[in-house]
Amino acid sequence: MGSGFNSDEMMRMFGAMKMPSMPDFQALAEAQKRNLDALTAANKLAMEGAQAVARRNMEIVQQVMGEMSQAVQSLATAEGSPQDKATRQAELMKAAYERAVANMQEIAELIQKSNGEAVGVLNRRFGEALEEVKSLMHKG
């Protein structure tokens, strides 16, 4: 009639309980390091891309300024009727506009390429991280 504590019964109950497996802390730490490495690489690519865009933009501005200066000089020294000068000015403006559009497209492509590379690094790491989580879950 004893309703006392039965240590054998208690140990049997603990033994029957399904304890969750401990996570592999080393694997988690390595995965986190790979995450940080991917972020660092993506940031580096983004910075390099931004610097390349800024450099190219400055080159374009300098080129355009030089071309504008030459165009103004050629118009100022051009001989001919006012109509000839107006026609020449219109041609120069059209060429300048076409170059400006091409330059904007080039800069946009540089930005897109740079962003694509940085996002690609993060996307690859995200896919790897999902696989790592799956494998950690299957080990447990």
Image (cartoon, rainbow, N blue to C red):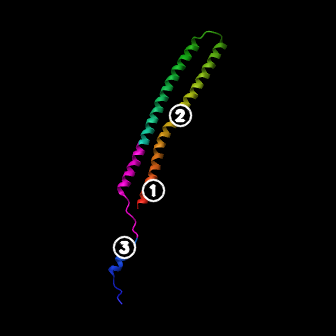
Residue underneath mark 2: 109
**Image quarter hosting the N terminus:** bottom left
Sort mark 1 into few (<14), some (14-19) or many (20+) by Cα contacts within 10 Å.
few
Which-is-in-front pick, marks 1 and 2? 1
Which three-letter amino acid code belongs to the residue tagged 2?
A: Glu
Rendered residue at 61%/9% (across/down): 79
Q: Amino acid at mark 3?
A: Gly
Closer-to-camera residue (68/16): 16
Quick one: label 2, few (<14), some, or many (20+) residues within 10 Å? Answer: few
N-terminal of the two: label 1 or label 2? 2
Q: Is residue 121 left or right of residue 76?
A: left
Q: CA distance from mark 1 to mark 3?
A: 27 Å
Q: Which of pointers 1 and 3 lies earlier in the amino acid sequence? A: 3
Helix, strand or loop at mark 1 = helix
Which residues are drawn in magenta?
18-40
The residue indicated by pointer 3 is 15
From the image, tell me which residue sits under label 1.
134
In the displayed structure image, the side of residue 51 where residue 29 appears, left or right:
left
Q: Is residue 26 magenta?
A: yes
User: Secondary structure beneath disc 3?
Assistant: helix
Residue 110 drawn above or below residue 63? below
Residue 99, above or below 50:
above
Q: Quadrant of the C terminus?
A: bottom left
